[in-house]
Amino acid sequence: MTEFFFECDFELNALDDYTDWVNRVLNSEKAKSGTINFVFCDDDYLLNINKKFLDHDTYTDIITFDYSKKEVISGDIFISIDRVKENAIRFRQKFSNELLRVMAHGLLHLLGYNDKTEKEIKEMRLKEDDKIKMFHVEQK
């Protein structure tokens, strides 16, 4: 089950499309969906979580808490809309594509992908691109 929560002045349209996309991403990795919560927030909200739970005093675009058990994928994915907007401008991307990239990034972490080494970062980027394309596939 995928749920969406909004802790800032942001709303995601077509929630069913995003839910369907999350399920297709998980299916493409042969994983089963548990409870996945996307929490959209602002910089201050996410900074507070970063300080409280990770002991980091920095802004970030995403924090993922993984509660998965074996192949059942579950977790909380917190996304700073402020960071997504700024990164979209910085990387000359549409906001909608940058948002999908960050959402895919969180899902990939829940699926066991990391981004600590150069090799892992490269694989993560390729996977993100692949998963973004899945959103734009004609839905049945």
Image: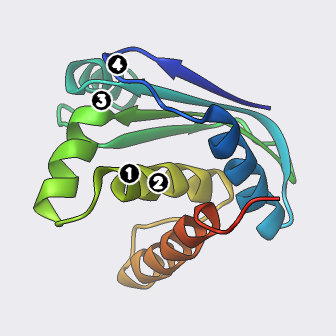
| Residue that extends furthest to the left in the rendered view of this protein | 90
Q: What element carries label 1?
A: helix
Q: Which residue does the numbered mark 3 point to in the structure image?
A: 55
Q: What residue type is labelled 2?
A: Leu
Contact between labelled residues 1 and 2, with CB atoms less than 8 Å apart = yes
Residue type (three-letter) at the residue carrying disc 4? Lys
Earlier along the polypeptide chain: callout 2 or callout 3?
Answer: 3
Q: Can residue 29 be seen in this view?
A: no
Q: Do the residues labelled 4 and 1 touch (CB within 8 Å)?
A: no
Q: Where is residue 4 in the image (x, y as percent from the top left)?
A: 59, 25
Position of 21 with respect to 76 (left or right) is right
Q: Alpha carbon of mark 2 to alpha carbon of mark 1: how far?
A: 6 Å
Q: Which residue is drawn at 70% across and 66% down?
A: 138
State whether residue 8 appears in this view. Answer: yes
Circle number at residue 59:
none
Q: How many labels does the image show?
A: 4
Q: Is mark 2 on a helix, strand or loop?
A: helix
Q: Which mark is residue 96?
A: 1
Alpha carbon distance from label 4 to label 3: 6 Å
